[in-house]
Amino acid sequence: MNLSFPFFITFFLLIAFFAPDFLSTLKGLIPILLGLVMFGMGMTIEFKDIKKVIDNPKWLIVGTVLQLTIMPLLAYLLVNFFELSNELFLGFIILGSCPGGTASNVFCYLANANLPLSITLTITSTVLATILTPLWIFILAKQTIQVNFWSLVQSTFWIVLFPLIDGFVIRKILKNKLNNMLRFFPKFSEFSIALIIGIIFSINSKSLHEISLVLIIVILLHNILGFLLSFVVCSLLNFPKDVKKTITIEVGMQNSGLGMALSLFHFGKIVALPSVVFSLWHNVSAMILINIWKIKDKDT
């Protein structure tokens, strides 16, 4: 297990706790950092990986549909059942409406899952999220709070799709000249997401009492039920083991960095709390899930 990401998170959380004023001044860096992460992801896209998946489109179609429906609908059902405040309600809707996170590719690799499918699912859901993330937020939250649909579309485009396409185009133009830089991007992505978490925590340093037991329970249920439902559907469809693992991880892990950015810049710091807590938890739960699979694989 690569320990650099937990180290970065711990480091920035300590700074957020002891020197919140310092990190909170970096608020304007959040969309820039997230855009750079997506740029790096765009640079890693290889047509040969995507072609392997397109040759068997059933897995991609099912995975994409599950990824873009289970989590937003689960979020809506859970926040209504637990009757959360309007701000936390909106925060969970935003989190659930986000595409798969880039960290899911790393966890699919660790789980011996189908890595080309994982990468293609992440790319597909990310591209579709430019419209679908704002659309889900608008549909599910419009009765609770005023939502500017086109403003969300613009933010998602500039933070996600534009840098993703830029990275892909630049890689195609420069080809192998960027190989050394590509080795640097995974660590930069870990650093950037950890820094974003630290900044959000520092901004919310006086509001951490809002992280109640109920909020944590909803986070756990959202993530675990996302894993469970997607695994059950894939099992019913008799997908191969590596495909089931891939889709399960892709559905249960969200792009919480995007959730933080959209929440903070469109609605406020309390709205960002679900994405912040989820960003910490889903890495832990994914590792637990992978270890469960490894134990089961040894027994069979």
Image: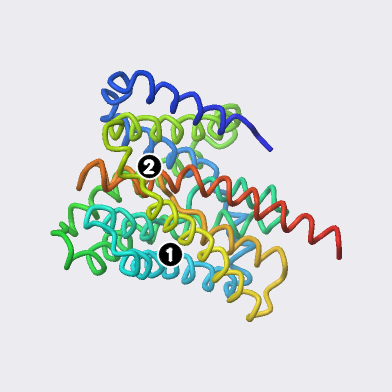
Residue 175, position as x, y percentages in the image? 55, 37
The label nearer to you, 1 versus 2, is 1
Of 42 and 219, the residue lying toward us? 219
x 50%, y 41%: residue: 43
x 36%, y 60%: residue: 97
266 vs 56, left or right, is: left
As helix, strand or loop, the secondary structure at mark 1 comes to helix
As helix, strand or loop, the secondary structure at mark 2 comes to helix
Residue 278, position as x, y percentages in the image? 44, 48
- Find residue 16 and report its image quarter: top left
The C terminus, quarter of image: bottom right
Of 151 and 17, the residue lying toward us? 17
x 56%, y 35%: residue: 186
Callout 1: 10 Å neighbours few (<14), some, many (20+)?
A: many
Nearer the N terminus, badge 1 or badge 2?
1
202 vs 187, left or right, is: left
- Find residue 7 and report its image quarter: top right
The residue where tag 2 is placed is: 163
Of 255 and 213, the residue lying toward us? 213
Residue 105, position as x, y percentages in the image? 59, 49
What sort of colour scheme is used for the picture? rainbow
Task: Identify the amino acid type marked 1.
Answer: Met
185 vs 83: above or below: above
Residue farthest along the left direction in this orientation: 146
Callout 2: 10 Å neighbours few (<14), some, many (20+)?
A: many
60 vs 293, left or right, is: left
The N terminus, quarter of image: top right
x 54%, y 58%: residue: 250
The residue where tag 1 is placed is: 71
Q: Distance between the residues labelled 1 and 2?
A: 25 Å
Task: Identify the amino acid type marked 2.
Answer: Pro
83 vs 119, left or right, is: left
